[in-house]
Image (cartoon, rainbow, N blue to C red):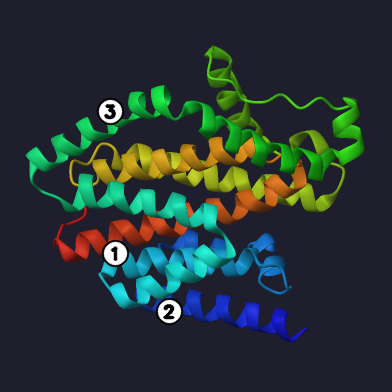
Amino acid sequence: KSIGFLNRALFIITLLFFIKKNYLPLYVKLFLIFSPSLIIYSSVTLRDNLILLVTIWSMYFFLKRYYIFLILSSLTLFIIKPQNFMILFFFFYLIIVFIDTKNKNIQLFHKLLILTSIPIILIYYSEPLLVSVNSLRFGFFVEQHGFYTSMTGASSFEPLLLNYELFTKIIKGTLYYLISPINNLHSFNHIIIMLEAAFIYLYLFINFAKDLKKKNLQNIALIWIFNFFLTASIYGLFIFNSGSLARYRIVSLIFVLVGYELHKKIYMKMNKVQKV
């Protein structure tokens, strides 16, 4: 009970801080206040709430250049959710290179670096990388189906292979992430989760489409769209339980929802950009 109370208190303090700073628009504030998932996750001992808050604070400290606090929050995230830590820091790298860096030559260099590193990784490191990835995926598969069932083939595990089918699986995994648990709507909780996700999708789609038309916010929108689909494809490939996936998804979606608004507001304040 005490951990659940602490969870809720941390969430309320975080929400009040960002509301006071006027970083969040009205619709996002209302969603965060009345979201059933957030009310539940921030009131029990699940670590989802802590992961969400640490990730949001890490993004805030990064955008505001509070590097000591960023190190502390990032280390906390690394301890409790290392995969989220790696995704977040790759995201920081993209922001530094393609938004914060004004030098076009440096941006071009990093674009070429990314493009050239992909074939090098595929040629020299694809096999050990796939072994590690499939080993991790099989662990989640066993968690869903049970070890005996998995090993006897009643529920066959399909390892990822470096061929055209990999792209098909990435697309299927992304769709699975986006619509889970639509095939398992047997409870009121699952219906609420789907409605919450639908609201966030609609809100993000409208704002991404609007901001892509603004020259000063174009790169920010593109990077957050990339983050959204990268996260969706990774979770869709690794998580086999639709209920667990829906729980992880609400954390990542709310991070995108809040982080995107924080990024725009802080960027516009730091660069004194007027809304258009």
Kind of residue sitting beneath label 2: Phe
CB atoms of marks 3 and 2 within 8 Å: no
Q: Which mark is residue 156?
A: none
Q: Is residue 240 left or right of residue 85?
A: right
- Please provide percent x and percent y for residue 37: 68, 60
User: Which residue is painted at 25% across and 36% down in the image?
Assistant: 213
Q: Quadrant of residue 130?
A: top right
Of the numbered discs in the image, which one, if any, rests on residue 115?
3
**Residue 106 or 258: which is nearer the viewer?**
106
- Tell which circle, 3 or 2, labels the residue nearer the N-terminal end: 2
The Cα–Cα distance between marks 2 and 1, rounded to whole angstroms, is 16 Å
Q: Amino acid at mark 3?
A: Leu
Picture coordinates of residue 276, whole percent (x, y): 20, 49
For the residues labelled 2 and 1, say whether their Cβ atoms are less than 8 Å apart. Answer: no
Residue shown at the point (33%, 43%) measured from the top left: 223
Q: Image height check: is 236 above or below 165?
A: below
Within-10-Å neighbours for mark 2: few <14, some 14–19, many 20+: few
Q: Which residue is mark 1?
A: 63
Query: Which residue was labeled with disc 2?
Result: 17
Q: Residues within 10 Å of mark 3 (few under 14, many from 20)?
A: few
The numbered mark, 3 or 1, whose residue comes first in the sequence reads 1
Which element carries disc 1, helix, strand or loop?
A: helix
| Horizontal and vertical percent position of residue 116 | 27, 27
- Point out the frontmost of discs 3 and 1: 3
Q: Which element type, helix, strand or loop, lies under badge 3?
A: helix
Quadrant where the image shows the N terminus? bottom right
Measure the alpha-carbon separation of dots 3 and 2: 40 Å
Instruction: Looking at the image, tell me whether mark 2 or mark 1 is earlier in sequence order.
Output: 2
The quarter of the displayed image where residue 6 is located: bottom right
Answer whether residue 236 is visible to the viewer in this image: yes
Q: Quadrant of residue 170?
A: top right
Disc 1 marks a residue whose amino acid type is Leu
